[in-house]
Image: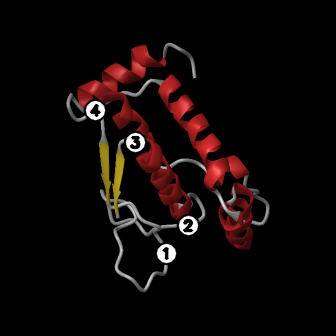
């Protein structure tokens, strides 16, 4: 993507979704957020939540439907939109309270939050590890003014 994207795409987005509905994040902030995610992930992941294990699970699910496609580790072990929201929030807030974050499971017998708060899409577990995300948030809460309300 060229640096000129902001001169073409951003004005159209802001016209269609005027402030305060839209916040444009710097690509540098997104890249830094993803790098931070990968570093923290290395510290808190256990053997079941590794990117490699997630890629194998996704490959198994995908292989049954599309045997010619492969899954890359970075495709499945990526931070959630909640992570990027948290990174942004820490840029403008002294403390952050997070609500509704949990170790989401596709076939849970326990009542849980919706997969997305904003729609009724059927959730999947081969893109993000919600248990890993929750552990990362809890680890950050030990060091920063982050309060995770599950």
How much space separates mark 4 and mark 3, taking CA atoms? 16 Å
Q: Write the residue at 76% across / 56% down.
A: 70
Q: Look at mark 4 in the image and give the residue it sits on.
A: 22
Q: Residues within 10 Å of mark 4 (few under 14, many from 20)?
A: few
Task: Tell which circle, 4 or 1, labels the residue nearer the N-terminal end.
Answer: 4
Instruction: Determine whether the residue tagged by mark 1 lies in a helix, strand or loop.
Output: loop
Task: Tell which circle, 4 or 3, labels the residue nearer the N-terminal end.
Answer: 4
Q: Write the residue at 40% across / 42% down.
A: 86
Which quadrant of the figure has residue 47?
A: bottom right
Q: Look at mark 3 in the image and give the residue it sits on.
A: 86
Question: From the image, which quarter does the N terminus lie in?
Answer: top right
Where is 145 relative to 109, above or below? above
Where is 62 relative to 39, above or below? below
Question: Dots 1 and 2: beta carbons under 8 Å?
Answer: yes
Q: Where in the figure is residue 48, as x and y percent of width and height?
A: 68, 68
Q: Nearer the viewer, residue 59 or 149?
A: 149
Q: Look at mark 1 in the image and give the residue it sits on.
A: 106
Instruction: Determine whether the residue tagged by mark 3 lies in a helix, strand or loop.
Output: helix
């Amino acid at each position: 993507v060229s640096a000129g994207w902001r001169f073409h795409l951003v004005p159209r987005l802001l016209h269609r979704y005027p402030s305060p509905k839209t916040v444009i994040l710097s690509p540098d902030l997104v890249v830094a957020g993803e790098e931070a995610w990968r570093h923290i992930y290395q510290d808190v992941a256990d053997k079941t939540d590794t990117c490699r294990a997630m890629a194998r699970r996704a490959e198994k699910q995908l292989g049954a439907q599309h045997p010619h496609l492969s899954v890359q580790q970075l495709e499945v072990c990526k931070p959630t939109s909640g992570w990027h929201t948290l990174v942004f929030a820490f840029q403008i807030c002294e403390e952050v309270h997070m609500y509704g974050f949990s170790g989401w499971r596709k076939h849970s017998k326990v009542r849980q939050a919706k997969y997305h708060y904003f729609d009724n899409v059927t959730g999947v577990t081969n893109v993000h590890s919600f248990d890993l995300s929750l552990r990362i948030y809890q680890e950050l809460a030990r060091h920063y003014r982050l309060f995770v309300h599950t």
